[in-house]
Image (cartoon, helix red, strand yellow):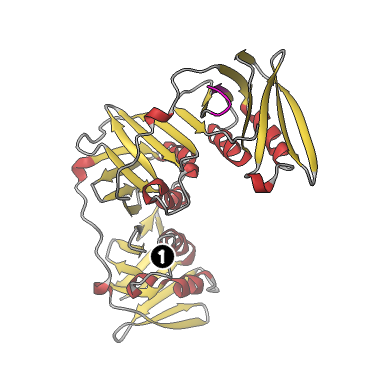
Amino acid sequence: MKFDILRDRFLNGLNDVMKAVNTKTTIPILTGIKIDVTNEGINLTGSDADITIQTFIPVEENGEQIINISETGSIVLQARMFNEIVRKLPTNEVEIEVTNGFATNIRSGKSEFHLIGSDASEYPLLPELSADRQFSIPADLLKSIIRETVFAVATSESRPVLTGVNWKVEADELICIATDSHRLARRKVKLENLPTDITSVVIPGKSLNELFKILDDSTNPVQIVLTNQQVLFKTDDVLFFSRLLEGNYPDTSRLIPEDYKTNVTINGKSLLQAIDRASLLAREDRNNVVRFETLQSNTVEISSNSPEIGKVEEQIQVETLDGEALKISFSAKYMMEALKAIDGQDVIIQFTGAMRPFIIRSVADDAILQLILPVRTY
């Protein structure tokens, strides 16, 4: 196996597949990156058994020669070391040659490295997924869906299924839900050609976070293939496989209140900034709690206090305020993350009482819903 490649383009591909490599894996071959060289280009594969990422670098791209292939073949090279070497090579031209057995020479300028590779036939094969369960989402929309939900997954492994985002198919709608049992984030989107045989899967939050880093902000379609154990996201040059989480995701629909006693419409950005300021003094040992109180004449007060440090109070004008007077306390962190997901738009907050979950939605778009459980302080 022998080829020359432009270092910058090679490094882009390596950076993508490195997101799936975990040095703590119990399967030694998975500490490596698999390099497959064909006459069409190079496939790079990284995996930790839960996530597998494969990226393709073509011989030519936009009329520019990226790779010169002298001899095809495959090798697995130790991922961290190989990535570091390529990153620090002195020129943009890299030559890689595998000689006797798995001895691999990497040359660039006057630098030459010799690595011992592994047999590529020992590397696990990619899963075979049937393309008839395929639907597509524009890349920028998929990034939005991830950004608006994944922050609310559980970080504790006590209920593993809650560490993922539940993707449900109902008619022509994809509903994505994350909850850690203290808050909930839900995003709905209407799509065509949704699968009818698989109606609910749970995708690990970790996988979605890594996928988010790889996706660009274009409207190019991302093809999604679902099975009962795996999901595949396909872009033009990347295949991203993730295992699914086992177990039944709880029915969260009953958590969302039907009736509300107090409704507040407010600028999301102003509220976010006020809570951010109040959280500076919020007591760390009380989970960063901030209080929210409705006042007369379309005003609410955001406050927090810490006996050791002091207190803060700030009043904000709201656009509308109707229903019962309310005092409620909540985690500043949870509220700020929910408002960031709605992205600075005007929001409507709907309360059903001081100790009941409350809802935050965008005034302009009810596709995004955030739910937060209050904290008992009064």
Q: Which of the 4 quarters of the picture holds residue 302?
A: top right
At horizontal 43% and vertical 58% (from top left) the residue drawn is 16
Look at the image and say whether residue 349 sits in the magenta stretch: yes
In the image, which residues are magenta? Answer: 348-355
- The residue closer to the viewer here, 294 or 338, is 294
Q: Where is residue 250 in the image (x, y as percent from the top left)?
A: 35, 39
Q: Position of residue 226 (x, y in %)?
A: 26, 44
Look at the image and say whether residue 41 sits in the magenta stretch: no
Q: Which residue lies furthest to the bottom in this view?
A: 100
13 left or right, relative to 70:
right
At horizontal 30% and vertical 43% (from top left) the residue drawn is 248
Q: Which residue lies furthest to the front in this view?
A: 378
List the residue tagged with mark 1: 21
At horizontal 35% and vertical 53% (from top left) the residue drawn is 240
Is residue 32 visible in the rendered structure shown here? no
Position above or below: 128 against 26: above
Position above or below: 107 against 146: below
- Quarter holding the N terminus is bottom left
